[in-house]
Amino acid sequence: MGLGRRTSRCRGAAPGRALALCWALAALASGCCATGGCDADSLPLTRHLESVYDTVDFVRYAVRWRCWDALYEVLSARTREHGGPDGGPLGRFDFTFAFPRATYGDLDPHAPPELRDVKLAWIVHKSQILNVVENFPRPGEARVFLRYEPIELSRLGFPLINEGTAERPRWTLGLVEWAEEQSR
């Protein structure tokens, strides 16, 4: 039997249903609809990120369960404004599809060849937290130092930025700020 019209779709399935099923399978395969921990009741601290440690726990949880939409909520304002294509705004859609594919080489121009293709999500998920330093290098900022062999420790100091007030802090993840530091 050749590749005719009859074999191009599922037997007995309406074309619209087959298309919807294909879209659903593609969404699951891309990780955008991860199950398990992304519902509002499961997310830790329900996004009240008043300490650096709350934010670190939340980011690692969101990466582990592939809660890209929730992770977008804790990006710094500069990352949202300048983290998109060509330094433009980074929208939620772009982030949820780009971050799972982002590699260490995308953010660190000095990355050795063997580390360029390591996914950032993998590094965040599998690394060991060595230290969290508040008010470093400036007041209202913090650094989360991770250990992921064989990356140098000095290259894995992710910035957290307080975009709240001193009385009611809201710590956010500064990916653009980190990339700028790595390019120096």
Image: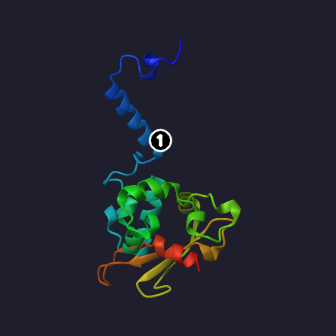
- The residue type indicated by label 1 comes to Ala
For label 1, the residue is 29
Judged left or right of residue 166, residue 107 is: right
| Quadrant housing the C terminus | bottom right
Q: Who is closer to the viewer here, 99 or 9?
A: 9
Residue 179's place in the image compared with 165, above or below, is: above
Colouring: rainbow
At horizontal 43% and vertical 74% (from top left) the residue drawn is 52
Q: Is residue 114 visible?
A: yes
**Label 1 neighbourhood size at 10 Å, few (<14), some (14-19), many (20+)?**
few
Instruction: Describe residue 159's horizontal placement relative to residue 16 as left or right.
Output: right
Residue 46 position (above or below residue 136): above
For residue 6, above or below residue 37: above
Q: What residue do we see at 61% from left, 58% from top?
A: 118
SS at mark 1? helix
> Is there any visible trace of residue 54 in the rendered image?
no
